[in-house]
Amino acid sequence: MPPRTPSASAGSSAAWLPRLPALLPALGFLAIVLAPPLNHDVAAVLDFSARMLAGERLYTGLLDVNPPLIFLLNLPAAWLAAHTPLDGPQALLLGLLLLCGGSLALCAALLRAAGGRAMGAVERAVTGAVLPLLLLAAGYDFGQREHIMAVAALPYLVLAERRILGALTPWRLAVPAVLLAALGFALKPHFLAAPALVEALVLGAGLARGRGAAVLRDPVPWAMAALWALYLAAIPVFFPAYLGHVVPLVWQWYVGLDGAPWWRVLLAPVLGSGALFVLGLAALVPPAMRRGAAGWLPALLAAAAAGGLAAALVQHKGWSYHLVPVWLWGGWAGALLLARGADAALPPAPARRAAPLLAAGLAFALALFALRGDQSPWIQFRFAAGPPGELTGWLEREAGGARVLVLSPDIAPAYPAINYAQARSILPFMSLWLLQSTYQRCPEGGARYRAPREMSDAEATVFRTVAERMAQAPPAAVLVSNYTGIPACGGAPFDFIAYFRRHPLFESAWAQYRRRGEIDGHQLFVREE
C-alpha cells in the first residue's frame, strides 16, 4: 500500500466518525462486564475448576449437577490464575472476551465469504454495531453456560444460511464454526433443542428447493452429532461417578427443587417476556421472507431462539440467564429484519447515508432493552458499597488466600467473594442445596433433625463429608447463612451449626471458632490458633 498521506488519514478518520456513536453501547457493556462482581454461578464453576487443578477429583471429592464439559473449559482460566499475576475472575474474563472476539471475527469472515448473501450498507453497519453489543449485553449473566453456548453458536447460524443457499464454505471457516457450536450445545442436554430446530429449517428449505438429498449429505450436522457422541461416551470412561452417583442424586433431589410446572414458569416475568418476544419474531419473519428482503438468517436465528426458549422451559426455574440465548439470537434477528428491509426499500446512496444513523438507533434501543429490571449495571453500581462488597472485603481480611467453609443453601453471595479473596472452599458442593432438598418435609415424629440412622444416603453424604473435612483440615473461617431455605418444623427453625454439631468430628473442631460478626444475614466464625 502507498504511504498514508495526511489527506488520506483525515479521510479515513472522517469515514469512521459517523460509526462511533453506534459502538458506544457495546463499549458501555464492555465496562459493565469488566466491573465486579463476577456472576456467582460462573465464579462457583471457576472455583471448582481451580480445585480440580489442585488435585481434587470431580464427582468424587467435588459434587455438582453440571456435566463435566463446563469445568474442563474453565481449566485454562484456573491455570492462568495459578501461574500468572492474573486472579481467577480476571483470567476467566480474558478467556470469555477472547471467545466473544473469536466468534465475532468468524461471523464476519463467514458473512464476507464468497457465495453467500450480499450485505447491503445498512445491514453491514447494523451488524457491526449490534453484534458486539449483543455478545456483551448479558451483563451480570456474562459467562453463564447459556451465554457461552449462545456466543459459540453464532458462526454456526451464519454457516446455516450459507448451507441453505448452497454456498461453498472454506474448511478454515466451517471447521471452527462447527467445533465451537458442538462444544456450546454440549454444555447442557437441553441446549440441543436449538440445533434441532435450526437443522429442521435447513432440511425444510432444502426439500422446498429440491435439494433434500444434498442437505442429508451435508457433513455439518453429522460432524456435530459425532462430537456429541464422543463426549457422551467419554463421560463414563473419565468421570464414571457422574453417571453412577451424581445423576441419581440430581434426578431424585435437584430436579424438583425450587421448580415449577412449565406453564407457571411460562407465566413468570422473565420467561413470559421471552415467549412473547419469540412469538413476535415468528409473526414478523414469514412476511419478510415472502417479500424476498429478509433472507434466511433471521429465520434461522428465530428458530434458534425458539429452541433456547424450549431449553429454558425444560429447566423449570425461570432464571434470567436461561433467556440469554433468546435475547442474543432474537435481538440479532430483529435487527437484521429491519436492516435488510431498509436495504431493500432504499436506493443505494440514501441507504449508505442512513446506515450509521440506523445502526446507532438500533444499538441504543437494544442497549436500553438490556438495561431493564434490577440487573446490570445496577448490580455493579451497588456491589462495592453493598453487602456483597462488604462480605468480599471481610473474607479478604479474615481468610484471604486460606480455606473457608460456607454453610448456605445459595451460591451467592459467598461466590464470587471467595474468588476475589483468593480463598478456597472446602465444601464438596457449591452450596447446601442437597441438604435443603432432603429437608423440604419435616422428619417424622416431630424431631427437628433426623438421627444418622434415619438419614437417606444423600443426607448422610452431606452430614459425613462436611464433618470430616472440617476435622481433617480446619478452615480459617466458616461463613454461615441464617437463611437455610428449609421450612421450620414444630416452630423450630433449621440451624446449620446446630445440625452439624451433632457429628462428633464437627463438634470437636468447632471448639476452635469464635463468632466475628454478621453481614446481611451471614455470620462469620474465625478459627483461633
Image (spheres, helix red, strand yellow):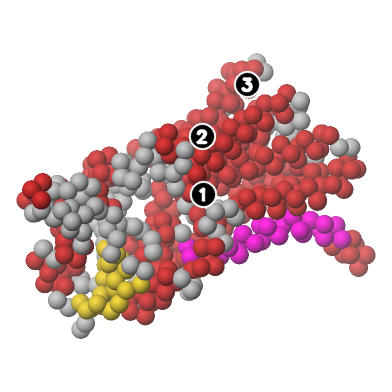
Q: Which residue is mark 2?
A: 307
Tag 2: amino acid:
Gly
Of all residues shown, which one is farthest toward the front?
491
**420 over 428 or under it: above or below:** below
Q: Quadrant of the N terminus?
A: bottom right
Q: Which residues are magenta?
A: 14-38
Mark 3 and 1 residues: CB-CB less than 8 Å, in contact?
Answer: no
For numbered disc 1, what is the local secondary structure? helix
Say whether residue 378 is visible.
Answer: yes
**135 over 162 or under it: above or below:** below
Q: Which residue is mark 3?
A: 206
Q: Which residue is mark 1?
A: 147
Mark 3 and 2 residues: CB-CB less than 8 Å, in contact?
Answer: no
Q: Position of residue 360 (x, y in %)?
A: 75, 52
Q: Nearer the viewer, residue 9 or 342?
A: 342
Q: CA distance from mark 3 to mark 2?
A: 20 Å
Magenta-colored stretch includes residue 21: yes
Is the residue marked by circle 2 packed among few (<14), some (14-19), or many (20+) residues within 10 Å?
Answer: many
Say whether residue 12 is visible.
Answer: no
Tag 3: amino acid:
Gly
**496 over 157 or under it: above or below:** below
